Image (tube, helix red, strand yellow):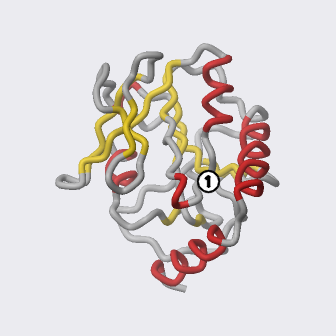
Amino acid sequence: MDKSQIRKKYKEKRRLLSRNDIDSLSLEIANLSLNMPIWDKTYYHLFLSIEGKKEVNTEYLLHILQGKDKSVVISRSDFKTFEMNHFLLQENTPIKISEIGIPEPTDGIVIEPSLLDVVFVPLLAFDDSGYRIGYGKGFYDRFLSKCRPDCIKVGLSFFESERQIIHENIDFPIDHCITPKKIYGFKNSNLYL
């Protein structure tokens, strides 16, 4: 299957999930994340879920991060440049839902990608080599290319991996992916489970 076919397939799979499915599967993903040796780091980038796209609910991961007193970084997308700006999440960080449904900070303390230790990555699908398919705008590929080589990139998915996804040179692989059933580790990872 090509990327557009895979996007269509996984959007449909997500569409069939109920609110209860999303919450219980997201909680399983968050609980499984506790088995990863990533919790000794400082800066964690977390995407805020787009409810209308039935993404993994990252609220559970946010509670874990806050409970461990970690620095959480969130982003605002610029659809003119297809770049993301990153801000430290604090109690007083103003969050607004964008025109396309993305919860984003409107202002705050700017954090450079080079500071990030762990990035939780949204995706529609991923394969056995760690390549992911998102919504097709390349925001995360551009963002991940600016992170340090030792930054740990962790995908979050309701569904298990595809065998192989055709990828391009600009596609940036993830190191791990957490599903409700297991944690995948890929050959590009510098973190072994």
Q: Quadrant of residue 172?
A: bottom left
Query: In which quadrant is the C terminus drawn?
Result: top right
Residue at 37% in and 26% down: 94
- Residue 141, how many percent across, how many down? 38, 54
Residue at 59% in and 50% down: 155
- Residue furthest to the top in view is 69
Residue underneath mark 1: 187
- Residue 37, how many percent across, how many down? 71, 30
Question: Given the image, on which type of amino acid does mark 1 rest?
Answer: Lys
Decide which of 188, 73 is in the foreground and name it: 73
Q: Is residue 43 left or right of residue 136?
A: right
Q: Quadrant of residue 165?
A: bottom right
Q: Under tag 1, what secondary structure?
A: loop
- Residue 183, how many percent across, how many down? 74, 49
Q: Residues within 10 Å of mark 1 (few under 14, many from 20)?
A: some
Count all numbered tags in the image, as a single digit. Answer: 1
Residue at 61% in and 53% down: 187
- Residue furthest to the left in view is 80
- Residue 185, how many percent across, how many down? 68, 50
Decide which of 114, 136 is in the foreground and name it: 136
